[in-house]
Amino acid sequence: MAKKLSSFDQEPQAETLFSYFNEISIISHLGAAMFEKALPFGLTNAQFSVLNWFIRVDSEASPGRLATAFQVTAGAMTNTLQKLAAKQLIKVEPDPHSGRKKVVTITEKGRQQLEQAISSAMPLFAELSQLFDTAKIDSQLPLLREVRETLDEMRYKK
């Protein structure tokens, strides 16, 4: 049995939150590895996530905005965007309002490959749906969304 960390003796609520976020982190790592294996077209999780961002959040963005959204360096985002552009899944064009900035948008091919990538992962989710009570998971989604939204807001306050 794992030992309790002494730093939690004075803050028992902190131990609960640590355990909660630790479990989420481990689930994220394991789930991402499984999901990436199911992705077609040589897509990585990072590339899939950028394509998905365009569907979920906004139709265009600067590379800097994307780097901030994903909390990665500008260089890491540039690398991901170059790979997506080489696959013709996004377009990176000059910003008409600025001589130096770029505007990134998803292409129709990017939309199609995102849909195909999601379809390719469906067998994984079908298998998981046999292992877990999806009604129970569905009931947890509001709390997870609230936690995500709170953490998302917090990162801009510092």
Image: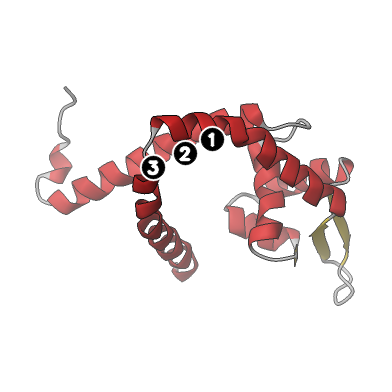
Q: Residue furthest left?
A: 9
Q: Residue at x 67, y 52 (%)?
A: 52
Q: Quadrant of residue 63?
A: bottom right
Q: Position of residue 49 (x, y in %)?
A: 65, 47
Asked if the residue under mark 2 is in contact with the one under mark 3, i.e. CB atoms within 8 Å, the reply is yes
> Which sits in the foreground, 118 or 130?
130
Q: Quadrant of residue 150?
A: bottom left
Secondary structure under badge 2? helix
- Whole-number angstrom distance, CA of label 3 to CA of label 2: 6 Å
Q: Amino acid at mark 3?
A: Ile
Secondary structure under badge 3? helix
Residue 154 visible in the picture: yes
Asked if the residue under mark 2 is in contact with the one under mark 1, i.e. CB atoms within 8 Å, the reply is no
Residue 24, numbered label: 3
Residue 125, numbered label: 1
Q: Amino acid at mark 1?
A: Phe
**What residue sits right under mark 2 in the picture?**
28
Foreground mark, 3 or 1, reads: 1
Crowding at label 1, few (<14), some or many (≥20) Cα neighbours within 10 Å?
some
> Which sits in the foreground, 37 or 8?
37
Secondary structure under badge 1? helix
Residue 74 visible in the picture: no
Q: Amino acid at mark 2?
A: Ser
- Whole-number angstrom distance, CA of label 3 to CA of label 1: 18 Å
Q: Residue at x 42, y 36 (%)?
A: 27
- Whole-number angstrom distance, CA of label 1 to CA of label 2: 15 Å
Q: Residue at x 76, y 30 (%)?
A: 42
